[in-house]
Image: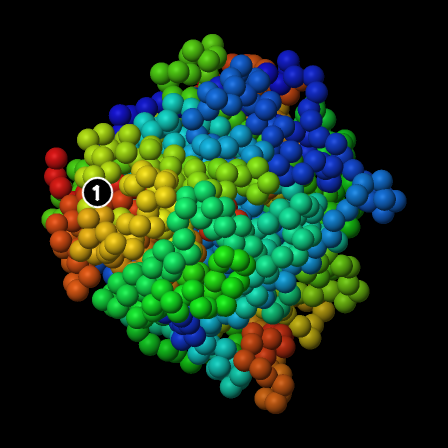
Amino acid sequence: MSIKKRVAVVGAGMTKFMRRAQETGKELAYEAARMALDSCGLRIEDIESVTMGSAPDAFDGVHMKGEYLIDGAGAWRKPYMRSYVGGGTGVFAPIHGWQHVASGLFDTCLVVCEEKMSSCRPHPQAAFLTIFDNLTERPLGPNLVWIFALEMHRYMHVHKIPKEKIAVVSVKNKKNAMDHPCAQLAQKITVEDVLNSEILVWPVQRLDISPTSDGAAAVVLASEDVARKITDSPVWIDGVGWNLDTAYWTNRDLYYPQYVENAARMAYQMAGIKNPREEIDFAEPYDPFDYKELHHMEGLMLCEKGEAPNLAWEGVTQRDGKLPICPSGGLLGVGNPIAAAGLMKICELFWQLRREAGKRQVPGDPRTAVAQAWGDLMQVGTVVVMRA
Amino acid sequence: MSVKIKEYPGTPLREEDLKQGKVLLVSYWPKARYVWSAGVAIGRYLTELKNGRIVGRLCSKCGRIVVPPRMFCEWCFRPNDRWVILKDSGVVNTFSVSRITADATRIKEPLIPAVIQIDGTTDAGILHLVGETDPEQVRFGMKVQALWKPPEQRTGSITDIKCFRPIER
Amino acid sequence: MTAKVAVIGAGMTQLRSITPDLSYKEMMFEAAVKAYNNAGVDPRKDVQSFVCSSEDFWEGTSIFDEYVPDQIGGSLKPVCTISGDGLYSLITAYMQISSGLIDVAAVEAHSKASEMVSIRNIMSLALDPIYVRPLAADPYFVGGLEMARYLHESGNTREQCAKVVEKNRGNALRNPYAAHPSKTTAQEVLASEIVCHPLSRMDIAEAADAAVVVVLASEERAKELCENPVWILGLGWCSDTPCLEAREWGEAVYARISAEKAFRMAKNVQSKDVDLLEIDDSFSYKELQHLEAMGFCKKGEAGVLTQKGKTAPNGEIPVNASGGSLGMGYTFEMAGLQRLCEMVLQLRNQAGERQVKNVRTGLVQCWRGIPTASGAAMILTSERS
């Protein structure tokens, strides 16, 4: 690998994350894109390419959803593509954007992620049936939560993790989210509340899960030649990695996300990070469920396998702890409009590394951070390392 | 920038707003219908399920026997070598207890989805349900066996196996 | 500055109207094996990134990217999906290599169109849910409207469009990969039933199933691995408005802009230097519209050129010697990659009976189909410079 061009994030924007928005998908995309442009003083004419990230078309009820969103994303008569790796899309879209600029083809790229899950009625959950194998799994009528529960249970069993040490993540993130102006589910809860919440698919309970949401986020990427002209403090994308495991998820031991580790290694190699535990100041791993944050922390090699629950329990991952995890409030607190949620984490890294995160600001002098998204049938890891 | 931005766009709606007609609604029911070719591998798998048997495939290069079967080994990247008729018993690799169905409806009798590693396979497992048991009794590593529907009710589907039930205590 | 990237291998399964015996996984495996063999690479060792094309609703499965890695050798490797034509995935792989991140990439696309029972309903799902779908029209109306406007503005005729069908389906007779070769005459096309005036049934390319995999490499690796690399000289892609109401119906603006970008990037190549075109003809009039938009002739001239045989395989500007989508079969998201595969064979002098003489530089183009106004173009050459 011999990367030729450095690429920076120079602007970011996002909408509120809501259970149900009045805005259409196009409007959500527009609002986020508009804000990202305004945040760095650029006009749409200054943008040379646009890339979109959006997860299942089944939610919006629009086939070829990427095409439908073109005008909202500012891509009229521009080079435009949509990438899609399930839940990993939110962090893959900026990687795709990075590829646009690092290739030398463009100096600027606008990355937009949008999700409108509320269009699917009576409940977006039902659309998830179609992600399972059409011939060997769908006839069993699986619910998406089953697959999380199977993984969570395996993780808990292998490492003998008590539920409390996982529940504490939900408490932390929903509390962190109280300082996030776009948050859908910010609230003060206790470990007791989580353990007493409705059992959906044991060991998954209601307060372990992030909700379905509508929302959009956007970032502006620029090559090093122009980044400094646009802003005094560009935040550099120094590492990118992505990895997809086999579709045969039932042929794997689910206790460890090997694909996240592989993606992290790819990103760390590019970023020149040899010791992630020492060199990463804070992280935004994907947390659609509380145990996922821990699972991914281990995959990102921020701690030993099985150690993450202890770190969470001991407060190490609090915003003022030694290794802040999800200072934004994550998906559990801010909301989960699938692709937009991943990009929200990139926005968070951007704001944190520029000391613009307000009440959410991680103390000290954070310089290097990692964001990660996950998706599919416990399959994809997408990782981005950013530096101030 | 997030400190400088005062307003974040987005107009939340509630379910009541829709029900009370405060927002105009357009409804559409997609008619997306498909006929999928099971192909060689799954075609045989489903046919054998109708016969009351579980089949897998062997890759003689790495020695893995896999189920659900495919005609290639994804790790060696080569066509695999032969069919293997497997026992219909196995071991619970992981399980959970579900109080909801595919569209989030609550159910009284819980379902027990599980990944069952079929005896004789390497790292293989299939998704199915554990049944004929109290959810409290299910354990990691528990031995289970397929409970088949009677032959005349089988259609060549994964549901030809009603569930996997525990064998031996 | 962008790097030099080459196609070092390609593999395609035969296009067929139906494939009841094979699952999409088995077809992808076949194409992958052919491609990796052609490129002389082991995907588990040499290929560092895999980019696939798909759209959930063509497949009937959400988050379809879940199901791609195994049969193309991508398990536990960097794999991603682009919701777009295979040519877009190729461009993504190009960017990955040009960035210096990786050296060898594989690109995949396939079509299992025969599995879509309610194809028109699925196509309708791509129409705007508020403004267009409630009209409940056959989605091909978009093609009808565009054809009508295009013929009106350009002065080309239905007969000339029908000639495109005659040419391409005839060309396909020499293509062993083709699914719909035939000796169709322009008269038969004009006599076929009207779907949405002036679009008739035979103006529309019939669907086919197939899979294709293409392998790309950086300049250094291409020289190591391959004796006859096909170099990518230029590329461009563009999306015009998705709003039917706001659209330019007469001109294929996306094709004009894509080609402009591709030629600008290719520097010393002009339209007259292109020896062969493999461009979208999923509707007969589209071939004419794309030729004019990309500057290969003036507006209104493409019909006459076709009638006079200038776009025949032995003509001045050979177009779709493969048979195009009309002759080979329309493969949805695979269409662009199918044309690229044909172009690679032509540039390597391996196109058998359908080989066009003296092909050294070619242009491949795609359109994403109804109801989009998006497409991409790519210029390739076999010449070392």
Residue A305 horizontal/vertical position (percent): 49, 42
Residue at 46% in and 16% down: A234
Colour mode of the rendering: rainbow
Residue A327 horizontal/vertical position (percent): 61, 26
Residue C80 horizontal/vertical position (percent): 42, 46
Compared to C48, does A149 lie above or below?
A: below
Compared to B27, does A321 lie above or below?
A: above
Compared to C348, does B128 lie above or below?
A: below
Is residue A40 or residue A274 the one in the foreground? A40
In the rendered view of the protein, which quadrant contains the N terminus of chain C?
top left
Asked where in the image residue B16 lies, by quadrant, the reply is: top right
Residue A136 horizontal/vertical position (percent): 53, 69
Q: Residue A152: in sight, yes or no?
A: no
Residue at 65% in and 17% down: B5
Is residue A125 or residue C249 the one in the foreground? C249
User: What kind of residue is marked 1?
Assistant: Val
- Name the residue that disc number 1 marks: C274
Check disc 1 and report its element: helix, strand or loop.
loop
Q: Is residue C385 left or right of residue C242?
A: left
In the rendered view of the protein, which quadrant contains the C terminus of chain C?
top left
Q: Is residue C182 left or right of residue A237?
A: left
Residue at 59% in and 40% down: C245
